[in-house]
């Protein structure tokens, strides 16, 4: 990299080998990587951060993924399901706080009741905000017809993380049955595209059995899929999961964090105008983790607005931050956190993916 006169438009065709080298970078090369990604971010999406109020609707899940603390077989979890009025109150809070967008996240459930309930909630959120809130859903694999119903009811974006784009590694992270097929995940991502969503995905970084080549391929895979938004971060182990016995094989937390920063930076270089979230998992390792992610390429921040009494139960991994705070506490610290990054907060803005918008224009 030429630090004095970087050609920021020349990196979108990075080879697999070049990406691996960047993931291994240190010292001046690492600094140059972050400088490049910051310049590209400023040029293509600006130095502003979009807010997404996070509502963790339920921790009940039909999946049994080996890495997840709310997996179906974990009997130690206190299950909960927010009442409709609690979800609507949280959405109202986000609107009144000028967030512009919310994310409704839950364990993966597929049923007529679940489809109809979320459909009804979306209509009520649209009505009470007079269409002023964008809604992202993160509710797992569903049928195309379900996705279409939710889209029509008011959902604009959908996050469905692949966790790894390597089919062999995917098999090591999930039970070997029809409910956890890699191909099914890909089919669901395609169905989201057909239904007209801004489509998001993401991976875990520092998984057991994962290589730098896997991570490099993850980045190229997301680029080839023309994804609109990404949420990715470090893998954090949970003691009540089948992967926990492999914890001694993991990279140190600091290395997983650093790899996550590099993944964000490289993805910003590869996909200049997408939305990239600063994941909560980053803050679990480093108190300023999300701020550091924003500096190197992320442009979405998700304050947790789930009612406080439930936050500790949506525990995908250990040491989840901010579980003892209220929505108001999160809002109060946003200004302080963003001031540390030198970025402005895009209040009252939806923050749609510029990548998604450009694809619509070019159709």
Image (cartoon, rainbow, N blue to C red):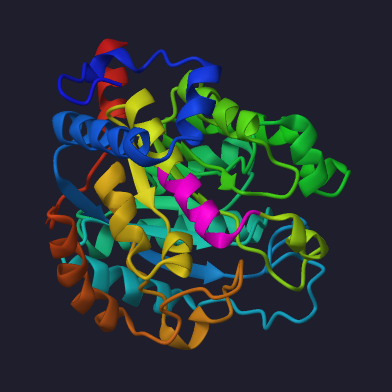
At x 41%, y 72%, the residue is 87
Residue stretch in magenta: 251-261
Q: Which of 26 and 57 is in front in this view?
A: 26
Asked where in the image residue 12 lies, by quadrant, the reply is top left
Does residue 259 belong to the magenta stretch?
yes
Does residue 100 belong to the magenta stretch?
no
Residue pushed farthest front?
27
At x 45%, y 75%, the residue is 321
Residue 334, horizontal then vertical, whole percent: 21, 69
Asked where in the image residue 189 lies, by quadrant, the reply is top right
Q: Which of 19 and 24 is in front in this view?
A: 24
Q: Compared to 357, does 85 lie above or below?
A: below
Horizontally, is 10 left or right of 282 in the view?
A: left
* Res. 177 in view: yes
Residue 270, horizontal then vertical, whole percent: 38, 24
Q: Compared to 77, does 198 lie above or below?
A: above
Q: Quadrant of the N terminus?
A: top left
Q: Quadrant of the C terminus?
A: top left
Q: Nearer the viewer, residue 118 or 205?
A: 205
* Res. 194 in view: no
Horizontally, is 273 left or right of 60 in the view?
A: left
Residue 318, horizontal then vertical, whole percent: 60, 73
Horizontally, is 219 left or right of 346 in the view?
A: right
Residue 50, horizontal then vertical, whole percent: 23, 52
Q: Which of 293 and 77 is in front in this view?
A: 293
């Amino acid at each position: 990299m030429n630090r004095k006169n970087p050609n920021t438009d020349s990196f979108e065709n990075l080879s697999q080998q070049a990406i691996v080298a960047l993931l291994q970078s240190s010292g001046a090369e690492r600094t140059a990587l972050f400088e490049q990604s910051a310049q590209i971010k400023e040029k293509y999406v600006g130095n502003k951060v979009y807010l997404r109020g996070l509502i963790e609707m339920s921790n009940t899940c039909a999946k049994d993924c080996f890495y997840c603390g709310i997996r179906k077989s974990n009997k130690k979890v206190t299950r909960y399901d927010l009442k409709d009025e609690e979800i609507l109150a949280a959405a109202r809070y986000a609107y009144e706080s000028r967030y512009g967008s919310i994310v409704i996240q839950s364990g993966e459930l597929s049923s007529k009741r679940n489809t109809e309930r979320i459909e009804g909630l979306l209509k009520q959120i649209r009505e009470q905000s007079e269409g002023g809130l964008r809604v992202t859903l993160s509710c797992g694999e569903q049928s195309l017809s379900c996705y279409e119903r939710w889209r029509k009811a008011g959902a604009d974006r959908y996050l469905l993380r692949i966790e790894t784009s390597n089919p062999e590694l995917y098999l090591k992270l999930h039970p070997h049955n029809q409910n956890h097929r890699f191909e099914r995940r890909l089919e669901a991502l395609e169905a989201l595209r057909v239904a007209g969503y801004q489509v998001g995905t993401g991976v875990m970084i520092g998984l057991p059995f994962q290589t730098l080549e896997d991570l490099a391929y993850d980045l190229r895979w997301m680029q080839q899929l023309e994804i609109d938004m990404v949420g990715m971060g470090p893998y954090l182990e949970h003691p009540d999961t089948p992967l926990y016995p492999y914890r001694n094989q993991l990279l140190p937390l600091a290395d997983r964090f650093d790899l996550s920063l590099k993944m964000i930076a490289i993805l910003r270089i590869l996909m200049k105008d997408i939305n990239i979230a600063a994941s909560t998992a980053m803050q679990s390792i480093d108190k300023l983790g999300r701020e550091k992610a924003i500096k190197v390429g992320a442009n979405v921040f998700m304050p947790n607005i789930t009612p406080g009494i439930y936050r500790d139960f949506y525990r995908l991994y250990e040491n989840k931050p901010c579980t003892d705070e209220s929505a108001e506490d999160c809002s109060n610290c946003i200004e302080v956190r963003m001031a540390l990054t030198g970025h402005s907060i895009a209040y009252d803005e939806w923050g749609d993916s510029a990548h998604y918008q450009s694809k619509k224009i070019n159709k």
